[in-house]
Image (cartoon, rainbow, N blue to C red):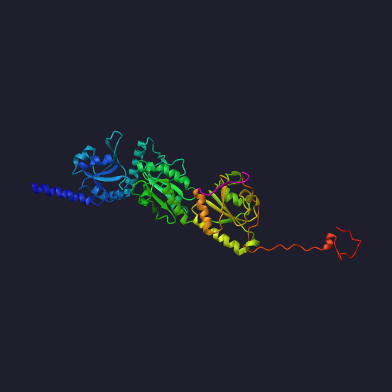
């Protein structure tokens, strides 16, 4: 009798193993582990019988569901033959029976029955919808009636009305994967505590990276397809989508604003071309790339923010420096600009004396050329390079400006002068203007000096 009992138990164990092995993503639950597991987190549970043909057919699909929802919703299984009392407690009368198990506000275990198809996609979508409804209910919100498994992540209220772009199954590829822009994306769940803590930081990050890197967010409880595609295994998961959108980089640094911003800015800077050093030929160049302007719908102009710093080199006249000397100055300036391309700076140059109004604003001209100025266009304050106009001196000057150790001065006059329109440099040496010759007779002085005493003297 004892041998027969042991044989029966071994057979049951072998049947369980045949369904879901110890290496499977499906969690095997028993009466001793069931309550603790469900009270710890949401579980999608299959109650099955080893002899059930439909259960055997469901096994590979259930494995797929467990793999897809790993880190999002726990997927489990209960052998109802071996643990009949547990199945009976939750009203299981047929096999397979699928329930989403959770605890209500009072801590009591409850279950929602699944009545849909038996493909992994159908089961996974239903589980995500139910988990979303449950999470929103705990937050005191209601799920959108159109949210069915593919809606966006804005319904949870995490990022609505902010600079964070809400991404979902329907727009992720068009917005991110097929885009030329860089994206920093958070994959989250509304019920996740760490995600809630990250939310205000993520909002600030979106504002600070505006114009450089797009910042988005995906609610994985409502958009399982996208989260599964990019192997999201826990929350929050943060990925950087750079030039290779199919293989984004996992972010594993700190979750403070400084760390996140530094990482995204560094990745952005690596892919940026060298900053352009523009010649100040007219007011439009200055406004578009330095001082900025508000939106003007009548002229179809979008708002342009002022740069943090506008860096202007006033170079010697072309007759003094020649083309080779000027080009040497510009090449040096481009090398320096490359070192600061991650910064919101704009780089300019002008020939000495070509923009007298701006030179007066910035106190240029008294010490000769070249002169180099760092201007804050919003505060209307500037600092002047007092050392030599060379790579190391300019870098040292900029580092002093950024650290606040360089002496700053208010713009003369309290506002910036309108720039004059000038022809751009053509890259050649300048030509000395030859004065037109004139005759002494044009001045009333002609003939031989002293030839006639009758001439009037000047």
Vertical comparison of 336 with 153: above or below:
below
- Viewer-nearest residue: 403 or 125: 403
Q: Is residue 413 magenta?
A: yes
Residue 428 rendering spot, x and y as whole percentages: 63, 64
Q: Residue at x 18, y 51 (%)?
A: 14
- Viewer-nearest residue: 27 or 211: 211
Residue 182 rendering spot, x and y as whole percentages: 45, 52
- Viewer-nearest residue: 283 or 68: 283
Q: Residue 192: in sight, yes or no?
A: no
Residue at the left extreme? 1
177 to the left or right of 398: left
Q: Residue at x 20, y 49 (%)?
A: 16
Count of residue discs: 0
Residue 270 rendering spot, x and y as whole percentages: 46, 56
Range of residues picked out in magenta: 404-414
Q: Residue 220: in sight, yes or no?
A: yes
Kindly indicate the quadrant of the structure image that contains residue 199: top left
Q: Residue at x 64, y 64 (%)?
A: 429
421 to the left or right of 90: right
Q: Is residue 406 magenta?
A: yes
407 to the left or right of 9: right
Kindly indicate the quadrant of the structure image that contains residue 150: top left
Main SS category, magenta section: loop
Residue at the right extreme? 454
Residue at the top extreme? 106
Residue 397 rendering spot, x and y as whole percentages: 53, 53
In which quadrant is the C terminus drawn?
Answer: bottom right
């Amino acid at each position: 009798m004892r041998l027969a009992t042991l044989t029966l138990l071994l057979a049951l164990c072998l049947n369980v193993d045949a369904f879901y092995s110890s290496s499977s993503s499906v969690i095997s639950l028993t009466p001793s582990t069931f309550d603790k597991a469900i009270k710890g987190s949401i579980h999608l549970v299959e109650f099955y019988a080893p002899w059930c043909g439909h259960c055997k057919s469901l096994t590979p699909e259930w494995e797929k569901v467990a793999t897809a929802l790993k880190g999002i919703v726990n997927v489990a299984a209960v052998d109802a033959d071996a643990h009949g009392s547990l199945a009976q407690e939750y009203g299981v009368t047929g096999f397979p029976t699928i329930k989403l198990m959770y605890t209500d506000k009072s801590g009591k275990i409850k279950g929602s029955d699944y009545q849909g198809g038996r493909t992994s996609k159908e089961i996974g979508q239903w589980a995500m919808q139910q988990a979303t409804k449950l999470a929103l209910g705990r937050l005191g919100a209601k799920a959108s009636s159109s949210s069915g498994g593919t809606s966006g992540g804005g319904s949870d209220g995490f990022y609505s009305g902010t600079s964070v772009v809400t991404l979902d199954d329907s727009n992720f590829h068009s917005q991110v994967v097929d885009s030329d822009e860089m994206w920093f994306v958070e994959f989250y769940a509304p019920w996740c505590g760490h995600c809630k803590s990250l939310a205000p930081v993520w909002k600030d990050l979106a504002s600070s990276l505006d114009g450089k890197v797009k910042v988005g967010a995906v609610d994985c409880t409502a958009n399982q397809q996208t989260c599964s595609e990019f192997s999201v295994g826990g929350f929050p998961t943060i990925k950087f989508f750079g030039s290779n959108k199919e293989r984004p980089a996992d972010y594993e640094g700190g979750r403070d604003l400084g760390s996140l911003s530094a990482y995204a800015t560094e990745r952005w800077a690596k892919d940026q071309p060298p900053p352009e050093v523009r010649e100040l030929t007219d007011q439009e160049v200055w406004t578009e790339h330095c001082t900025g302007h508000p939106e003007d719908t009548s002229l179809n102009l979008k708002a342009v923010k002022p740069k943090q710093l506008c860096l202007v080199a006033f170079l010697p006249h072309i007759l003094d420096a020649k083309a080779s000397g000027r080009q040497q100055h510009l090449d040096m300036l481009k090398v320096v600009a490359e070192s600061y391309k991650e910064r919101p700076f704009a780089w300019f140059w002008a020939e000495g004396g070509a923009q007298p109004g701006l030179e007066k604003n910035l106190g240029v001209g008294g010490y000769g050329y070249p002169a180099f100025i760092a201007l804050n266009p919003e505060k209307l304050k500037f600092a002047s390079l007092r050392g030599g106009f060379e790579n190391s001196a300019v870098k040292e000057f900029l580092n002093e400006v950024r650290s606040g150790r360089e002496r700053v001065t208010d713009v003369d006059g309290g506002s910036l002068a309108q720039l004059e329109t000038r022809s751009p440099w053509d890259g050649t040496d300048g030509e000395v203007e030859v004065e037109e010759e004139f005759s002494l007779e044009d001045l009333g002085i002609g003939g031989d000096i002293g030839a006639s005493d009758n001439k009037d003297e000047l």
